[in-house]
Image: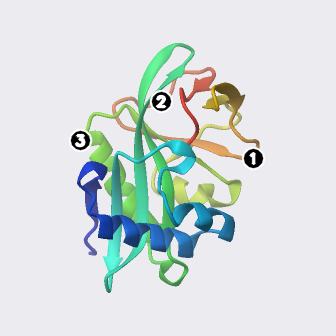
């Protein structure tokens, strides 16, 4: 079994950050790569920790986790917000996304998160479902961008991973910040 690294962002060496950003640029579109060339704080939300796998001194799989308290109809939920998930194209098909996602959620459980949350495009929801993520269906989710409360983009699929709680309460999910 391959060894994954779990690293707090506060302890992330500059060379590891650069290696992750370089691989993010290779894994995502040109528009996203322009952002990742200088930051991993997607929509201004920096990860609290990252989980990644290296081969031949290159990061081939990664997930970042944002620590955020969201509210669902007033109920606070400490969410492990998953962001910047990738497996480099030449390494896909070998279960690496599940390897880093499972390690990220084990770490989240150990850190006392209530559950994991992510937003993805419909085409990849099955990747997350294979490792225990639950599709939340047509749930309204709100975010804050430039001090304005807005709905999360249409077409995004909201998913949940049970940790301390087995299911999210019903109602509107308010992210209390931008999506991650």
Circle 3 crowding by C-alpha within 10 Å: few under 14, some 14–19, many from 20: few
Where, by quadrant of the figure, is residue 162 drawn? Answer: top left
**Badge 1 or badge 3: first in the primary sequence:** 3
Marks 2 and 3, how far apart at CA:
18 Å
The circle on residue 110 is: 3
Work out whether 94 lies above or below 150.
Answer: below
Specify the farthest residue to the right: 154
**Badge 2 or badge 3: first in the primary sequence:** 3
Q: Which residue is mark 2?
A: 167
Work out whether 53 lies above or below 98.
Answer: below
Specify the farthest residue to the top: 74
Question: Residue visible at 68% across and 37% down?
Answer: 152
The percent coordinates of residue 91 (x first, y second) are: 47, 81
Circle 1 crowding by C-alpha within 10 Å: few under 14, some 14–19, many from 20: few
- Secondary structure, mark 1, is loop
Question: Residue visible at 23% across and 41% down?
Answer: 110
The circle on residue 100 is: none
Q: Which residue is mark 1?
A: 155
- Secondary structure, mark 3, is helix
Residue nearer the viewer, 33 or 60: 33
Marks 1 and 2, how far apart at CA:
22 Å
**Badge 1 or badge 2: first in the primary sequence:** 1
Marks 1 and 3, how far apart at CA:
32 Å
């Amino acid at each position: 079994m391959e060894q994954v690294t779990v690293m707090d962002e506060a302890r992330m060496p500059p060379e590891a950050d650069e290696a992750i950003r370089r691989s993010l640029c290779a894994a995502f579109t040109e528009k996203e790569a322009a952002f990742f060339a200088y930051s991993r704080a997607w929509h201004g939300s920096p990860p609290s920790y990252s989980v990644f796998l290296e081969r031949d001194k290159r990061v081939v799989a990664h997930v970042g986790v944002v620590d955020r308290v969201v509210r669902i109809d007033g109920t606070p939920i400490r969410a492990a917000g998953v962001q910047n998930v990738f497996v480099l194209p030449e390494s896909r098909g070998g279960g690496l996304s599940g390897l880093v996602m499972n390690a990220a959620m084990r770490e989240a459980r150990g850190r006392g998160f209530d559950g994991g949350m992510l937003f993805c495009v419909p085409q990849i929801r099955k990747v997350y479902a294979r490792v225990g993520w639950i599709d939340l269906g047509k749930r309204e989710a709100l975010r804050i961008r430039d001090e304005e409360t807005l709905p999360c983009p249409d077409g995004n699929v909201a998913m949940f991973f049970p940790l301390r709680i087995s299911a999210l309460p019903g109602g509107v999910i308010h992210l209390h910040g931008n999506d991650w």
